[in-house]
Amino acid sequence: VYPANQAGSNISKFSVNPGSGALIVGGVQSTGAGSFPQAITIDPSGQFALVADGANDTVLVFSINPATGALVQVPNSPFTAVSAAGGNPSSVAVDPSDQFVYVTDPFEAQVFSFTFNAATGDLTPLASSPTASGNTPVWVSIDPTGQFLYVSNQTDATASGWTINGAGALTAMAGSAYGAEFAAGGNPTVIAIDPTDQFLYVTDVVQSTVVGFNIHPSTGVLSAMTGSPFTSGNGPWGEAIDPSGQFLYTTNDYDGTISMFAINGTTGALTPVPGSPLVYGTAPSSIVIE
């Protein structure tokens, strides 16, 4: 698990207990990550970690040591992540085929698209980029099939959806010029999708909850989940789901903790894991599981 720390401008590394989902704090390692790392993701091959640096308008790419999990920045990193007008990249996602990367820019209300070289970690802008989004798009996430892309729009209090074609270009789902918009709490932030492609979760940093949705398997349209929203720690920002789809974690920016939940495989409902929340540090902002 790699939480990105805005206050420390670095990335930390934890091990995960495979049975309980609890985080093992001992042996934490740190790696520099630009000036203001806002989000982190790992590519499907597990070879690279990509970090959105809001202060420098770039994406940093790190190779991952398969034995130790240690991070080393690739030679051509960082990569410019926004247009010449400037912006503030807030999140980054890699599609399941390991071919495309998408970055949200809340300042410009756009999603930027890139091809991804899975051998070197290099990013190249797509000709179809950028794509206009809703107001203040802060997070982007792609479903496990690679068919659908979702963005959380803080100012609109919605989640928007697009389909992804074979060239990586985005087409809005029916219902909106900026993607199909779904109500997502009062201040939606980070989006996570479970590996079975049934459930989507959005953190609400103001209401301190996680908003859950069911995903339509053929259209990608979202519907409200029974029991949602689910109470988290204070100010949940980042979130991640483990590869087995059993556990969800949120980084709680306001109280310096990490909340741990078990996911009901049938309904998607969240239940706190014993020991949750875990006291972590200062303003944890993002989390990813390798």
Image (cartoon, rainbow, N blue to C red):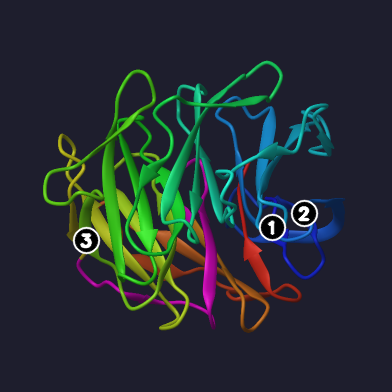
The amino acid type of the residue labelled 1 equals Pro
Q: Mark 1 points at which residue?
A: 3
How far across and down, in percent of the image, does residue 78 sit? Answer: 75, 38
Q: In which quarter of the image is residue 70?
A: top right
Q: Can residue 108 be seen in this view?
A: yes
How far across and down, in percent of the image, does residue 133 sit? Answer: 34, 52
Q: Which residue sits at x=63%, y=66%?
A: 285
Q: Mark 2 points at which residue?
A: 11
Q: In whole angstroms, how far apart are the C-alphas of marks 3 and 2?
A: 32 Å
Q: In this view, does 159 lie to the left or right of 232?
A: left
Q: Nearer the viewer, residue 181 or 110?
A: 110
How far across and down, in percent of the image, does residue 77 sit? Answer: 76, 34
Residue extent of the magenta highlight: 226-247
Q: Mark 3 points at which residue?
A: 182
Q: Nearer the viewer, residue 273 or 173?
A: 173
Q: Is residue 105 above or below residue 78?
A: below
Q: Is residue 126 above or below residue 79?
A: above
N-terminal of the pair, mark 3 or mark 1, is 1
Q: In whole angstroms, how far apart are the C-alphas of marks 2 and 1?
A: 6 Å
Q: Is mark 1 on a helix, strand or loop?
A: loop
For label 3, the crowd category at 10 Å Cα-Cα, with few meaning under 14, some 14 to 19 and many 20 or more, is some
Q: Which residue sits at x=61%, y=83%?
A: 254
Q: Is mark 2 on a helix, strand or loop?
A: strand
The amino acid type of the residue labelled 2 equals Ile
